[in-house]
Amino acid sequence: MYAGGPGAPLPAVGAAPAAAPPQQQQQQQVSSAAAPLPPLPPQPPAPSWQVSATADPAAAAPPPPAAVGPLQQSAPRQRRRCAEVCNDLLVAEAASLFTQRQYGPAAPAALEAVGFRVGRQLAERYSRDKARLGDTLEVIKFVCKDFWQAVFRKQVDNLKTNHRGIFVLQDHSFRWLLRLAPTAPLADGARAEAQARAAQPYLHLPCGIIRGALTHLGVNCTVEADARALPSCSFTIKITA
Amino acid sequence: MSAAVLTFVIVGQQDHPIYEVDLTGPKEQQAQYLHQFVLHAALDAVDEAMWATKELYLKTVDRFNNLFVSAFATPGGARLLLLHDGRGDDGVRAFFGEVYELYIRVMLNPFHTPSTKIVSKTFDHRVRMAAKRTLG
């Protein structure tokens, strides 16, 4: 049962926006239905509700249960946040999914292709209002600082180059592999190799993302990752063409 | 009001047009091939302007008779070109800003391949609205 003035839109979506500040923007008839909800935080008085209550006795009836819409719909739009663990789980699941598939391209190529596309789009987005980047070194620096900050939540710790087209980006605590890392770096060579092999499936996606970002900004290259000393991870970028 | 010659083209990274719209009013008939030719020829001038400066908005890069070509270069390598007859700088800059925003949204669409034509009707509609708003 939906008690509202004439022309009130249908349940939850229409009712919830009535509660908070943008009330004045909403049609007066809409606010009547949601105002009587008790659990909502104190809100500015709803004059239209008073008016319609007297006009329509049915408005005093119990509020429609479905109208407890999320208050966020009416509050000024806040940035939505997502837990970081969702990203870790998604990457892990993607790696295992592509590894188990019997058809289609092999897991490394498939994951890299996915990462490539994502990297292109992310580069487009994060290079938004920055000046255009001139040469390769500037592009790499952009990837190390702004792009890495946005995607991996920190900046690259160490950038090395041999000035002949090879760059090594070293991240001392790579967030995506943080859960995979042992508490102390492994000293034993063989175990480090085994660890690097174990981490390999999870690195195809970041490599693809980096390669996509670089290619989109004009630097054709190949990217390889080295996870021998987790949580520190290094990416080797070789410029081609 | 003088005849408003306005054609807008987005050129992708491989120098091919990925979006084209004719923004003239309904009553004016213009030679479309001339616009395309002028815009294509202006790409060289856009390249020169890009080498000269790091700015995104390149102002007027080329002229042909009484037609001006203004350009905006995105960091990703796409160029937005506008063919007009001497519109105000502010309007053109505002228009480019709005279309750049729309362009980024299209590029973020996972179902869109970056080097193919933009066929979204919503995009088309919004570009036209932005043109009306900023360019008159």
Image (cartoon, coloured by chain):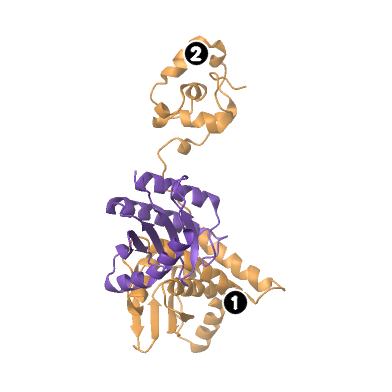
Chain colours: A orange, B purple
Tell me the subunit letter for badge 2: A
Residue A233 vs A154, above or below: the answer is: below
Q: Amino acid at mark 1?
A: Ala
Q: Nearer the viewer, residue A7 or A167?
A: A7
Res. A151 in view:
no
Q: Residue A236 falls in which quadrant of the image?
A: bottom left
The residue at 40%/54% (across/down) is B6
The residue at 53%/30% (across/down) is A14
Q: Residue A12 falls in which quadrant of the image?
A: top right
Please tell me how crowded label 1 is: few (under 14), some (14-19), or many (20+) other residues with Cα within 10 Å: some
Q: Amino acid at mark 2?
A: Ala
Q: Earlier in the sequence, mark 1 or mark 2?
A: 2
Q: Are marks 1 and 2 on the same chain?
A: yes
Q: Quadrant of the N terminus of chain B?
A: top left
| In the image: residue A156, left or right of residue A38 | left
Q: Secondary structure at mark 2?
A: helix
Q: Nearer the viewer, residue A139 or A184?
A: A139
Q: CA distance from mark 1 to mark 2?
A: 65 Å
The residue wearing badge 1 is A109
Q: Quadrant of the C terminus of chain B?
A: top left
The residue at 41%/44% (across/down) is A78
Res. B40 in view:
yes
Q: Nearer the viewer, residue A15 or A185?
A: A15
The residue wearing badge 2 is A53
Residue A192 image offset from top left, x and y in percent: 50, 84
